Amino acid sequence: MKLTSADEALLSLLRENARAPTAEIARRLQLSRTTVQSRIERLERLGVIAGYTVRVGDDFERDRVSALIMITVYPKQMPAVVEALRQMPEVRSLQSVSGIWDLAAVGMVPTIGDMDALTDRIGALDGVERTTSSLVLSTKFER
């Protein structure tokens, strides 16, 4: 499905704040409130908007430890490893990537010790060959 530039702008504003009043979004997009509401409903119906989620405040996130965890998986073990990682609430996202690594995970925990334990748990999963982690020092922006 091809999105219009107005649809892309609408999605961008919803990523900033999905709870923003429709009237405010309409004003920022210079569209009518009815048009914005119709576009949101259409994007939901078509599955472009699959749902809404909670974004935790910057003050809370700043006190937590984040890491990018790169994972190499043995052949034919990908489905089991992905499912095991899905069951770990500390793993915030998981992407399949090209290059020497197979997966890139974002882990978030309260302490460095917890991150050490998380990376050990990931490395011990059946099907995981090796991991490499990089701590996130700061997030410059997020959408």
Image: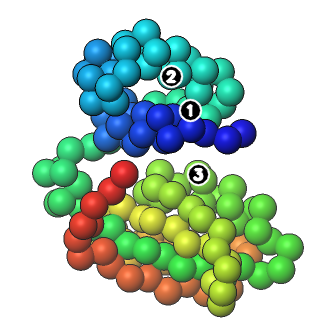
Q: Residue furthest bottom?
A: 100
How crowded pointer 3 is (Cα within 10 Å; few <14, some 14-19, many 20+) is rated as few
The disc, 2 or 1, on the residue closer to the chain's N-terminal end is 2
- Badge nearest the viewer, 2 or 1: 2
Residue 53 found in image quarter: top left
Disc 2 to disc 3, C-alpha distance: 31 Å
Residue linked to disc 2: 40
Would residue 126 be found to the left or right of residue 64 on screen? right
Q: Nearer the viewer, residue 34 or 40?
A: 34
Residue 141 found in image quarter: bottom left
Disc 3 to disc 1, C-alpha distance: 24 Å
**Is residue 111 among what the camera can see?**
no
- Badge nearest the viewer, 2 or 3: 2
- Badge nearest the viewer, 3 or 1: 1
Q: Residue furthest front?
A: 30
Residue linked to disc 1: 49
Q: Position of residue 117 (x, y in %)?
A: 41, 72
Q: Nearer the viewer, residue 11 or 98?
A: 11
Does 20 appear above or below 134? above
At label 2, which amino acid type do we have?
Ile
The disc, 2 or 3, on the residue closer to the chain's N-terminal end is 2
Q: Nearer the viewer, residue 2 or 19?
A: 2
The disc, 3 or 1, on the residue closer to the chain's N-terminal end is 1
Q: Residue at x 51, y 58 (%)?
A: 93
Q: Position of residue 7 (x, y in %)?
A: 51, 35
At label 1, which amino acid type do we have?
Ile
Residue linked to disc 3: 87
Q: Position of residue 114 (x, y in %)?
A: 33, 68
